[in-house]
Image (spheres, rainbow, N blue to C red):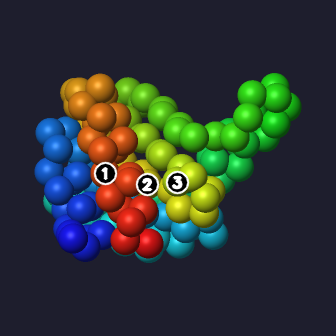
Amino acid sequence: MPEISDLLANLVKVDGVKAVALIGRDGFVIEQKTRNGKVDMETVGAIVIGGLHSSESIGNELNVGKVEQSMVEYENGIILSRIFPDGNIILTVIADQNAMLGNIRYQVSKFVPEIQKQL
């Protein structure tokens, strides 16, 4: 069975993906892989948690349930965060603006169960 680091290494090889990280609910990065090493994933981890809290507040206010996945498209990139079913781990993918979003979403949905088996 592949290790978490191997699974993340495969995910970062997906076209357009620049970095991936497993982030704990406390904002600390559990494991990370970057394509070029130029992404400060520790800072990203803290910011992702802040965004998650905001998204949860919106969900609670609108009574639409728990956050499962969050995606934000920026002028020069995409940030996709998938919350694991237990709510304590977040898989975050940073991709460039030309990445095929459907493929990234597919790959994330494929890798989450595999990663979850390793936790």
User: Which amino acid type corresponds to the residue marked 1 in the rendered image?
Assistant: Phe
Q: CA distance from mark 1 to mark 2?
A: 10 Å
What residue sits right under mark 3 in the picture? 84
Q: Is residue 100 left or right of residue 54?
A: left
- If you read the primary sequence from the N terminus, does the residue marked by circle 1 or circle 2 appear first? 2
Q: Nearer the viewer, residue 47 or 115?
A: 115
Q: Is residue 3 left or right of residue 62?
A: left
Q: Is residue 80 left or right of residue 14?
A: right
Instruction: Please tell me which residue is depicted at 61% across the width and 58% down the height of the picture.
Output: 86
What residue sits right under mark 2 in the picture? 91
Residues under numbered marks 3 and 2 in contact, where contact means CB atoms less than 8 Å apart? yes
Task: Assess disc 3: are there few (<14), some (14-19) or many (≥20) residues with their C-alpha within 10 Å of its C-alpha.
Answer: some
- If you read the primary sequence from the N terminus, does the residue marked by circle 3 or circle 1 appear first? 3
Instruction: Please tell me which residue is depicted at 27% across the width and 41% down the height of the picture.
Output: 107
Instruction: Please tell me which residue is depicted at 63% across the width and 48% down the height of the picture.
Output: 52
Q: Closer to us: mark 3 or mark 2?
A: 3
What kind of element bears circle 2? strand
Q: CA distance from mark 3 to mark 2?
A: 8 Å
Q: Closer to us: mark 1 or mark 2?
A: 1
What residue sits right under mark 1 in the picture? 111
Residue 18: % across, % down: 24, 49
Task: Assess disc 2: are there few (<14), some (14-19) or many (≥20) residues with their C-alpha within 10 Å of its C-alpha.
Answer: many
Q: Nearer the viewer, residue 45 or 109?
A: 109
Residues under numbered marks 1 and 2 in contact, where contact means CB atoms less than 8 Å apart? yes
Q: Quadrant of the N terminus?
A: bottom left
